[in-house]
Amino acid sequence: MTRFANKTVVITGASRGIGAAIARRFAREGANLVVSANEDAVHGVAQTIQAEGGRAISVLCDVTDKASVVALYDAAEKAFGSVDVSIQNAGVITIAKVEDLPENDWDKVMAVNTKGVFLCAQEAIARMRKHGKGGRIINTASGQARDGFIYTPHYAASKMGVVGITQSLAKEVAIEGITVNAFCPGIIETDMWAYNDQAWGKLLGTYAPGELMKEWVEGIPMKRAGSGEDVAGLVTFLASEDAAYITGQTINVDGGLIMS
Ligand SMILES: NC(=O)c1ccc[n+]([C@@H]2O[C@H](COP(=O)([O-])OP(=O)(O)OC[C@H]3O[C@@H](n4cnc5c(N)ncnc54)[C@H](O)[C@@H]3O)[C@@H](O)[C@H]2O)c1
């Protein structure tokens, strides 16, 4: 498939989990990939894409740091000429009872999940405007952008903030052919969810590893957790020509867990 031939896709948080799955899917569909994260494993993702016959570079970037974000988009333009799709996917979570939640956790989660989305979108839009070819901004929110879960007020706030950023930017750039959308994964099997399972499991009862997740998956109408591929299907659609008339939207990809 070559739906994204000659398109350059920048994706953050792509060293593993949802981001790596999205990157590999775009590469299989012909895109030039700029995979980024704040850990060295991201280089392995680029190597995997190359081994599968795709085009990719990897760039270390801390999305909370403006200079690091500028360097990421500079590297993308240097390697491939322009940026057509920018996926703000880097994210972190911590889980604690309200009186035990350190101020540092609040600051870090807001910095990565909300400010990081803004800094990357800001830089991507500036480059898209310069090239005048339109583009796609796609932001990772969460089921927690719909319904704040227990013991994670900072994470819920950070992801609801992503929806606000998405709507505001969508209105500003719509006339320039740039769409801005967000997606809300539900329970997707990644390292983050492995942490969630044990951290929520300790606070909500005496769950052995995997037990809480199993219980929550029972509450999903489709009765299964999601995969990175499930998410990649939605994200590639939002990046495609078929989604040209969709902007400012936040779409759930969660097997029916949340229906709003
Ligand atoms: N897994 C789920 O069930 C789930 C559900 C809802 C939302 N999400 C969201 O999806 C996104 C990806 O989640 P995942 O499950 O793949 O997580 P993960 O923990 O497996 O991967 C997180 C990625 O973010 C990167 N990252 C963290 N801090 C960073 C920083 N400061 N700068 C740059 N990169 C940074 C990590 O290097 C890694 O690549 C996150 O935004 C997360 O909040 C995940």
Image (tube, rainbow, N blue to C red):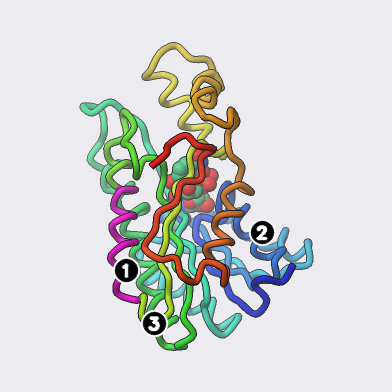
Q: CA distance from mark 3 to mark 2?
A: 27 Å
- Which residue is at a point 59% across and 54% down the rendered structure image? 232
* Three-letter amino acid code of the residue under disc 1: Leu
Q: How packed is label 2: few (under 14 Cα within 10 Å), some, or many (20 or more)?
A: many
Q: Position of residue 125 (x, y in %)?
A: 39, 76
**Total number of numbered labels?**
3
Q: CA distance from mark 1 to mark 2?
A: 26 Å
Q: Quadrant of residue 210?
A: top right
- Which residue is at a point 62% across and 69% down the rendered structure image? 33
Q: Which residues are magenta?
A: 158-173
Circle 3 — which element?
helix
Tell whether 187 sits left or right of 118: right
Q: Earlier in the sequence, mark 1 or mark 2?
A: 2
- What's the mark number on residue 176? 3
Q: Position of residue 230 (x, y in %)?
A: 61, 47
Q: Are marks 1 and 3 in contact (CB under 8 Å)?
A: no
Q: Quadrant of the C terminus?
A: top left
Q: Earlier in the sequence, mark 1 or mark 3?
A: 1
* Three-letter amino acid code of the residue under disc 2: Arg
Residue position marked by numbered label 1 in the rendering: 169
Q: Is residue 22 magenta?
A: no
Residue position marked by numbered label 2 in the rendering: 25
